[in-house]
Amino acid sequence: LFLFHQEVVSEESEEESNGVNLMEFSDEILLHILSYVPCTDLVLNVRRTCRKLATLCLDKSLTHTVLLQKDYKVNKDKVKQLMRDIGKEIYQLNMAGCYWLPSSTIDHVTRCKNLVKLNLSGCHVTSLRLSKMLSSLQHLRSLAIDVNPGFDASQLSSECKATLSRVSELKQTLYTPSYGVVPCCTSLEKLLLYFEILDRSREGFMLSGQLMVGESNVPHYQNLRIFYARLAPGYVNQEVVRLYLAVLSDRTPENLHAFLISAPGSFAETGATKNLLDSMARNVRLDALQLPKAWINGSGLLQHLKFNNPFYFSFSRCTLSGGHLIQRVINGGKDLKSLTSLNLSGCVHCLAPESLFRKAEDDIDSSILESLVVSCCNLRHLNLSAAHHHSSESIGNHLCQLLSRLKHLLSLALPVCSITDVGASVEKPPSTPNLVPQTFGRKVRIGVQTYPRNLGDQTNQKIESSVFWALMGSLRFLETLEIIGSSFSSAMPRNEPAIRNSLPPCVRAQSVGDSEVAAISQLTYLQSLTLAQLPNILTGSGLVNIGLQCQHLRTLSLANLGMMGKVVYMSALMDMLKHCKCLRDLRLEQPYFCAGAQFFQALSHCSSLQRLCIVSRSGTLQSDAVMSFMASCLEVIMCHMFMGESLTVCRNLQQSIVRSFQAERPALNVVIFPLLHEDLTEVIRDVPMRHLDEITLFKSRVAEEPPNLWW
């Protein structure tokens, strides 16, 4: 805004300048520049600077679609003014995750008479408000809402139901057992369901999966093309989703081409679901498929299902063998150039010919992976995490060498043990006696040695010849990378107490350390990086390389790096953070982490940081340092810390942050709580779903959902 103001003043005063006058650019270039400015700033601020910008800021290309979902500075008054000024020009409005806006803000959406697509996921909307709003949106075709306790479909007016009858795309997040508005949507073609119902109430009472009173109407699926359901842990979610599926089992839509159910843990198959799958095998040809592992394991379902031009497969946690993968999915090496996203997370036998007598730690069959790479040459998203994928000593058949052929990859998730060079020692970390100079007049401390910061420079030739270094060099356009230990589990599960003990890392992972992390710095366009359970991190020197080279990095998640009794990479992490000017989300999970003044001073260099989450068993924090950090980093709107401090210390700090900064930052969400406290799960349930799902809870996100599933 300051730049615009300066240029306009310069133009009006007609003062000569050696610089380029922004107003001399063509309208096309200016519109492209303005497209990066939040819509609220364009309409409420920028357009008031001069007549030319006043016209451009109201161009249809800028007002057609309004995105408020991560505009954390927007408030009720700004939304009201925005709708008053350009409401009739808005055709698509995304307010997903605007949890801080009062429910009365939704009333102003009624000004958007021409609205076609509306996303209100994460917003507070009652049945009556929803009815009033939808009654005036006659052109609406796409809708996303939450269904909270107290929702009553009988309160929806006839005008509201008429609007819903024309909606073809619906995304519904359920926090209570209900059909929501699905029975009113008689023209549905795309249905996305997110089940977030808890098994117990706040008072501790067990909840039932029975639908609420007045929920006797059944969904209409006759035109359905895409069905997607994602379940949070809990038996109630499973009971409710079965009610939705029961209608599908009676009559499978003829045009169904994507059927996806993501369910953690055990989700047993029933007679109704078996009938549904049998009907799908007979009557439809799919382009996208994801099923609970219990529905696939031990069944011959895959050989009966028919596929057209598949673009997404997820067999996460299934006991699918490599033989079945090639024969039943890839059809013996059939050309699958249409497949762009594949999730094999937790498929421990997917790269082996059979799984009956195979141990999880045995070497993979490289011919299976080669068939996969050749057949699915256009893959953009691939997840092979949560498994032991050990390469053999055959030359040219290492997993990294085969994956380097996938030149179109944008996101990749691998287990730590899969990237180690076969020739490296797998019994113990490489010994480094020559790294510490021996002298006669000085005793060398026994234990953790002091390693030079430029360790990579000393072994540069060896590092650059590694298979992982070559893989990173070949995937120049990779945007998301996850390297996660095959036995890693976060200390913060979803609906359970914190985990006190973790499983040891894979033996082969012992040789993956700082040099492999340094190889990641070749990814110039990297935006999201996750590193978890790398036991051989000695100094973290590779992190500094990433900070220097990966200038587009926006999301960073580090967990259990190096030895568990001490944060050995703290110095390197602080050096790295000084270079991360674009970093927006930071998640750190490490026992004994000290969140002190030096750490927060380094973190203050991340001027774009918006969300911070620290999970540390026996970790400590300095309250004054946290307050200074919050005062200096004005963009931070989420601060979650689950440490080893007392409940009193945590509560006092949380209250101080809220009192000091809530007024200036309406979206501020602060949770500071002892990690091992028995009430942790109760605290977690109050965290906005956007933060909980995107950063607070650890999970692999590569190929988690089909690309472009929603906005």
Image: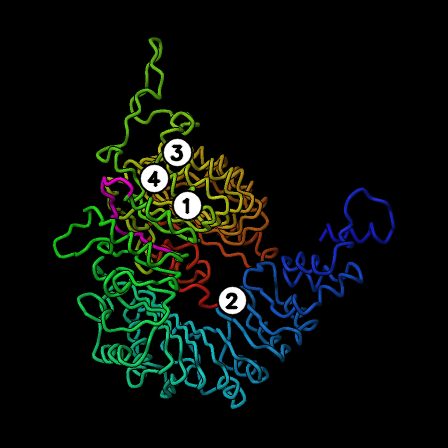
Q: Earlier in the sequence, mark 1 or mark 2?
A: 2
Q: Amino acid at mark 4?
A: Val
- Tally the marks: 4
Depicted 501 relative to depicted 271: above or below: above
Disc 4 residue crowd, few under 14, some 14–19, many 20+, Cα 10 Å:
many
Residue 114 position within the rendered picture, expressed as x and y whole percent measured from the top left: 62, 79
Q: Position of residue 409 (x, y in %)?
A: 42, 53
Instruction: Kindly report which numbered mark, 4 or 2, lies closer to the viewer in this rendering.
Output: 4
Query: Looking at the magenta stretch, what is its main secondary structure?
Result: loop
Circle 1 packing at 10 Å, graded few (<14), some (14-19), many (20+), is many
Question: What amino acid does circle 2 point to?
Answer: Ala
**Chain-order first, disc 4 or disc 2:** 2
Check disc 3 and report the residue beneath it. 464
Q: Which residue is mark 1?
A: 588
Residue 592, position in %: x, y?
36, 39
Residue 319 magenta-highlighted:
no
In the image, residue 212 above or below residue 613 = below
Q: What residue appears at the point 31 percent right and 69 percent down from the top-left corner?
A: 199
Q: Earlier in the sequence, mark 2 or mark 3?
A: 2
Q: Hey, what amino acid is under mark 1?
A: Leu
Q: CA distance from mark 1 to mark 4?
A: 28 Å
User: Which stretch is magenta?
Assistant: 382-396
The answer to whether the residues at label 2 and label 3 have Cβ atoms under 8 Å apart is no
Residue lying at 25% horizontally and 57% vertically, measured from the top left: 347
The answer to whether one can see residue 203 in this image is no
Instruction: Say which residue label 2 marks.
Output: 96
Disc 2/disc 3 C-alpha distance (Å): 44 Å
Of the residues under marks 3 and 1, which one precedes in the sequence? 3
Q: Is residue 617 left or right of residue 20?
A: left
Circle 1 — which element? strand
Sequence order check, earlier mark of 1 and 4: 4
Which residue bears the numbered disc 4?
467
